[in-house]
């Protein structure tokens, strides 16, 4: 699996993401600057890491979504490429229109930084195939704007199409229906607030995120 990691001014999880991908695939991902207008050829996965792109000015992810590289990321996604957005990356994907809904300020109006438990709601995606549906996993969260909001029609569509990937066991931010991560209609774009790349090595205090990258690598190796 060949992967690329998008880097914006303010990204602070790009190296963690690159390490997790390299551990799963044995290949260093391409690090792609936000001003690049084109992606390296032959990529199977684009990862948009967490951080504070452009200082979170205007809205989280709003400026990054207009960066030159995002046109190429959108083309990649629309052509069926796999895209993973974590935390700020989830916010960027929503602002870019690649996933539905919005991410608002946490219900408690405080930055949350701790480990939370998640329920895997579907194993039917390249991102979640390494887990059992209903499995409880522990990932860190670190965000101020992770309160996922969706209107009734969008929520019904997400539920009806089995596109809710993860929910919080104990909702830390007020997210609608406890949603922590969602899939696109073709199941090839995943956005999530918790950080699997920070739970992919025993030195980080947990390894529950490792299965996400291992499962993704296995799935994409078969179709490459």
Image (cartoon, grey):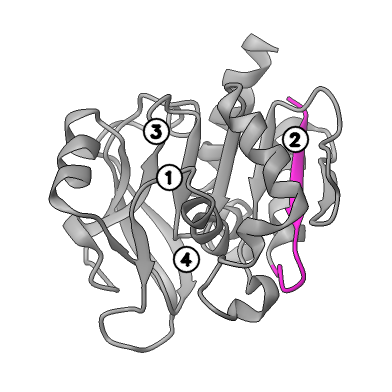
Q: Position of residue 210 (x, y in %)?
A: 56, 43
Foreground disc of the pair 1, 2:
1
Return the mark for residue 140: 4
Spatial CA span between label 4 and label 1: 22 Å
Reply above or below: 131 against 210: above
What residue is shown with label 2? 3
- Looking at the image, the residue that sits furthest to the top is 223
What residue is shown with label 3? 131
Does the magenta-highlighted stretch encompass residue 2?
yes
Residue 195 visible within the image = yes
Reply above or below: 61 against 127: below
Quarter of the image with the N terminus in it: top right
| Labels 4 and 3: the sequence-earlier one | 3
Spatial CA span between label 4 and label 3: 17 Å
Foreground disc of the pair 2, 3:
2
Spatial CA span between label 2 and label 3: 21 Å
Q: Name the residue at 39% across, 37% down.
A: 183
Q: Position of residue 90 (x, y in %)?
A: 50, 55
Foreground disc of the pair 4, 2:
2
Q: Secondary structure at mark 3?
A: loop
Q: Name the residue at 24% across, 55% down.
A: 150
Q: Looking at the image, which is closer to me, 154 or 42?
A: 154
């Amino acid at each position: 699996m060949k992967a690329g990691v998008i880097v914006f001014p303010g990204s602070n999880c790009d190296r963690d993401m690159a390490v997790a991908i390299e551990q799963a695939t044995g290949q260093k991902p391409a690090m792609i600057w936000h001003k690049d207008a084109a992606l390296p050829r032959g990529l199977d996965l684009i990862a948009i890491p967490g951080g504070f792109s452009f200082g979170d000015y205007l809205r989280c992810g709003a400026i990054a979504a207009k960066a030159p590289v995002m046109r190429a990321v959108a083309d990649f996604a629309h052509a069926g490429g796999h895209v993973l957005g974590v935390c700020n990356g989830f916010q960027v994907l929503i602002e870019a229109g690649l996933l539905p809904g919005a991410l608002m300020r946490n219900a408690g109006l405080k930055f949350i930084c701790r480990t939370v438990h998640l329920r895997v709601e579907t194993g039917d995606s390249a991102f979640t195939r390494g887990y059992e549906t209903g499995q409880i996993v522990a990932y860190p969260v670190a965000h101020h704007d992770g309160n996922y909001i969706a209107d009734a029609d969008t929520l019904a569509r997400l539920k009806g199409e089995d596109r809710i990937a993860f929910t919080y066991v104990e909702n830390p931010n007020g997210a609608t229906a406890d949603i922590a991560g969602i899939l696109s209609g073709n199941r090839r774009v995943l956005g999530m607030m918790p950080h699997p790349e920070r739970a992919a090595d025993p030195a980080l205090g947990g390894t529950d995120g490792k299965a996400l990258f291992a499962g993704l690598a296995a799935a994409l190796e078969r179709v490459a």
